[in-house]
Amino acid sequence: MKNVSRYIDLAFCLIFLPLMILVFPVERWWGTYPVFFSSFIGWLYITYFVYKYFVIPRLFHAGRQRIYALAAIAASLLITFFFSSYEITSPLYHINQHERELYSYLIWGVRQNQQAVWLHYIVVVIFCFAVGMLNEAYRQRLARKEVEYERNKAELALYKAQINPHFLFNTLNTIYGLLIMHSDKTETTLEQFINLTKYMYNNANHEFISLSEEVEYISQYIDLQKLRLNEFADVSFSYEVESPEMSVPPMMLITFVENAFKYGISSNEPCFIHIHLEQKGDTLCFEVVNSVFERNVKNSKRMGIENCRKRLSLLYPGRHRLDLGCSRDNTFHVRLELKCAPL
């Protein structure tokens, strides 16, 4: 934006004002009043920079800043009035008693000079206001975007903060169940839990991570959950990834996997969870199909999925599609499509 402002200044100094002088010829003053002509042109340049960099920015602020801007406007009007008054009074000093018949002609010329002074001043001020208003509109637009970005960033941090305890709670439940059963898998489970916690800690402040990292995390999470499952559970995870470096938000896909294990597993009835991830080009498709049980659905609040919805709307506005629902055969389907980019 600073470079654009400099180009506008150069265009005004080297093109706009010289062309205006040619269109409304005042160069005739150079022969009669060279000092006046030079001073007036210099004043026009001063007017431009004073209005552009001092007056207009302060007009958009309340209090003393606006008072300073109004004072500068009043001062510029006074100085311009001086220039126009000079052209009114100066020629009359050269009139003698024998030239009274030329008085009306001189007054006409003086009025033309006066109009030329004010015309140049007004055009310069209008040009400054036009440029200044565009600059201010652009500045306010950037400010609004910055505020919106910070708000979205704060919301994302809140949703992530809610997701992490959700994961910890579920995993600790798994470990607790193994401890009660005095399972020999407890040590392995704790080791996997530590690895998953490290992943979560290392990526907590990252807005995006590589798809390969998220896939590895999902695989470890599924392996951890399988330790507490019995022969009734059928769990599968498959993936086809063309670009492992594709970027995805951390802890996004795992939300649906957690949901499947929370509501789709039974200790005494056949159950299943099928997870498939496919990435082609810039499109990522993630599907989870799992069995559900009426007792689990009734107690479900699905806070993790709601947080995920909000994160998606902030990170992928208009670039995602999330379909989920429960069919009549007590099967829950999740299908997420994302338009992603390389990391």
Image: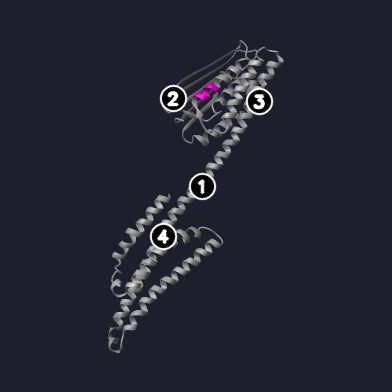
Q: Earlier in the sequence, mark 1 or mark 3?
A: 1
Image coordinates of residue 210 in percent, x first then y, are 49, 27
C-beta proximity under 8 Å, tags 3 and 4: no
Q: According to the image, label 1 marks what residue?
A: 144
Residue sitting at x 49%, y 50%: 140
User: Whole-Å distance between the Cαs marked 1 and 3?
Assistant: 38 Å
Q: How is the image coloured?
A: one colour
Image coordinates of residue 291 in percent, x first then y, are 58, 18
Q: Secondary structure at mark 1?
A: helix
Q: Residue furthest top?
A: 231
Q: Earlier in the sequence, mark 4 or mark 1?
A: 4
Q: Earlier in the sequence, mark 2 or mark 4?
A: 4
Q: According to the image, label 3 marks what residue?
A: 169
User: Whole-Å distance between the Cαs marked 2 and 3?
Assistant: 32 Å
C-beta proximity under 8 Å, tags 2 and 3: no
User: Whole-Å distance between the Cαs marked 2 and 1?
Assistant: 35 Å
Mark 4 vs mark 1: in front:
4
Residue sitting at x 33%, y 58%: 14
Residue 35 shows up from this direction: yes
Q: What stretch of residues is rendered in magenta?
A: 212-217
User: Whole-Å distance between the Cαs marked 4 and 1?
Assistant: 24 Å
Q: Which mark is residue 243?
A: 2
Q: According to the image, label 4 marks what residue?
A: 128
Q: Is residue 214 magenta?
A: yes
Kind of residue at badge 2: Ser
In-front residue for pair 296/234: 234
C-beta proximity under 8 Å, tags 2 and 1: no
In-front residue for pair 167/97: 97
Q: Residue furthest front?
A: 35
Mark 2 vs mark 1: in front:
2
Kind of residue at badge 4: Cys
